[in-house]
Amino acid sequence: MKSPVRFSLYAAAAAAVFPTFGAEASALEVTSTSVDDEGGLRAEFVDDVSPKTQVNYTVSTTASALYVCVDKQFEPLPEARFRAATETLIEEHAPFTSTPGGRVTGVLAVGPPRERLGFTCPIRASGKLAEVKYVQIRVQRENGPIALGEDQSKVLIRF
């Protein structure tokens, strides 16, 4: 009768020598996300792929924004009718080329949502982005793994 310990050692050795297909860990990682002073999102990432290969990446996120009318002194108008909110899915694609060692280091950026807001500002006032929030930030290699980034938000105009 064979010892169960010996069988376990054989199974562990076989697993180390013959890896399971499809169990490959992804090297794609979102290293940071941030919102710039204009309300745009930046997603920085790294990935390990074949050397000197062009690879397409996509960043996608659900973005919500609040726009307000501001006067010449950049003060928001107090009436609620001079505010409008929007939420939409935003994505951007870009190609990157890996280094001779197979490393891709990149930044993908998207602007804030600019959907038709359905509000107008009075004369001598203009619509400006007051707040923006990005959730479910995803970077994906074409036909490959997905990496998630931290949600981000920023208040640009306080009122």
Image (cartoon, rainbow, N blue to C red):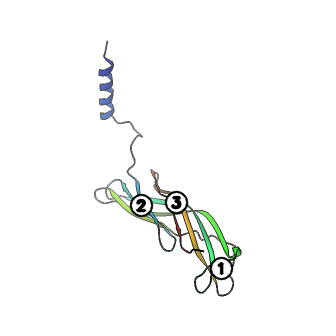
Q: Amino acid at mark 3?
A: Ser
Identify the residue at horizontal 60%, vertical 81% (top origin). Answer: 75
Q: CA distance from mark 2 to mark 3?
A: 14 Å
Give, as a three-letter code, the residue at label 1: Leu
Q: Quadrant of the N terminus?
A: top left
**Mark 1 or 3, which is nearer the eye?**
1
Measured from the top left, where is residue 112 in percent x and y? 55, 69
Q: CA distance from mark 2 to mark 1?
A: 35 Å
| Disc 1: CA contacts within 10 A as few (<14), some (14-19) or many (>=20) | some
- Disc 2 marks a residue whose amino acid type is Ser
Residue in the foreground of this view, choosing between 78 and 138: 78
Instruction: Name the mark nearer the viewer: 2 or 1.
Output: 1
Task: Give me the residue at 56% from left, 67% from top.
Answer: 132
Residue nearest the observer in this picture, 93 or 147: 147
Name which residue lies at 63% across and 70% down: 115
Secondary structure found at label 2 = strand
Q: Earlier in the sequence, mark 2 or mark 3?
A: 2
Return the mark for residue 77. 1
Decide: is 77 above or below 23: below
- In contact (CB < 8 Å): disc 2 and disc 1: no
Residue 127 at x, y = what percent?
62, 78
What is the C-alpha distance between the residues marked 1 and 3?
A: 32 Å
In the structure shown, which secondary structural element does the residue marked by tag 3 occupy? strand
**Residue 4 place in picture, x, y as percent:** 33, 19
Disc on the earlier residue, 1 or 3 = 3
Q: Which residue is mark 2?
A: 32
Q: Which residue is mark 3?
A: 60
Q: Quadrant of residue 63?
A: bottom right
117 above or below 144?
Answer: below
